[in-house]
Amino acid sequence: MASAGSAPERRLRGRCYCGQARFEVSDAFRYAANCHCSQCRRTTGSAFKPFAGIERAKLTVTAGADALLVVGEPDNHDAHCGRCGSLLFSVVRGGAYVHVALGTLEDAPSIRPSHHIFVGSKAPWFEITDDLPQFEGHAP
């Protein structure tokens, strides 16, 4: 709840490609990165996954929760739309955080990716051309 004189918390809307699965998340992300690991490349079908991390309790699935395709364990998984397959978010860090796939957001978040991770396993056909810091694995 906002304190006296402060603005209410900004909420961002996200959804899958077909619109069946929808969510809301606080615009209070703790970090954001571009992940080049092979799992993120496979689940997105892309060279990397741009994501932002936030406490799990700050994300609410607002539609299609019963039709999510969950790949993994309760506290470590990827959540996809069960109809179109879009990757919406990943539950990580023992279930405490979610990594929201930034491409699923309908509203622009206030955070931007600040670095690249797992560049040691990036796609050999992709060249990173920005000046963001690069890490072989997780960022320190």
Image: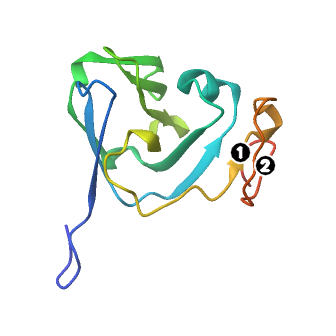
**Which numbered marker is on residue 135?**
2
Badge 2 amino acid: Phe
Whole-percent x and y of residue 107? 32, 53
Badge 1 amino acid: Ile
Q: Is residue 121 left or right of residue 16?
A: right
105 or 140, which lies in front? 105
Asked whether disc 2 touches disc 1, contact meaning CB atoms under 8 Å apart, the reply is yes
x 46%, y 44%: residue? 102
Q: Helix, strand or loop at disc 1?
A: strand
Distance from disc 2 to disc 1, alpha carbons, whole Å, reads 5 Å
Whole-percent x and y of residue 18? 28, 24
Q: Which quadrant would the N terminus be assigned to in this image?
A: bottom left
Mark 1, residue position: 117
- Is 130 above or below relative to 117? below
x 34%, y 27%: residue? 17
Residue 101 visible: no
x 46%, y 29%: residue? 75
- Is 71 above or below relative to 51? above
x 41%, y 24%: residue? 86
Q: Helix, strand or loop at disc 2?
A: loop
How many marks do you count on the picture? 2
129 or 97, which lies in front? 129
> Which of disc 1 and disc 2 is earlier in sequence?
1
Hey, which residue is sitting farthest bottom in the picture? Answer: 5
**Which numbered marker is on residue 94?**
none
Whole-percent x and y of residue 111? 48, 61
- Is 29 above or below relative to 120? below
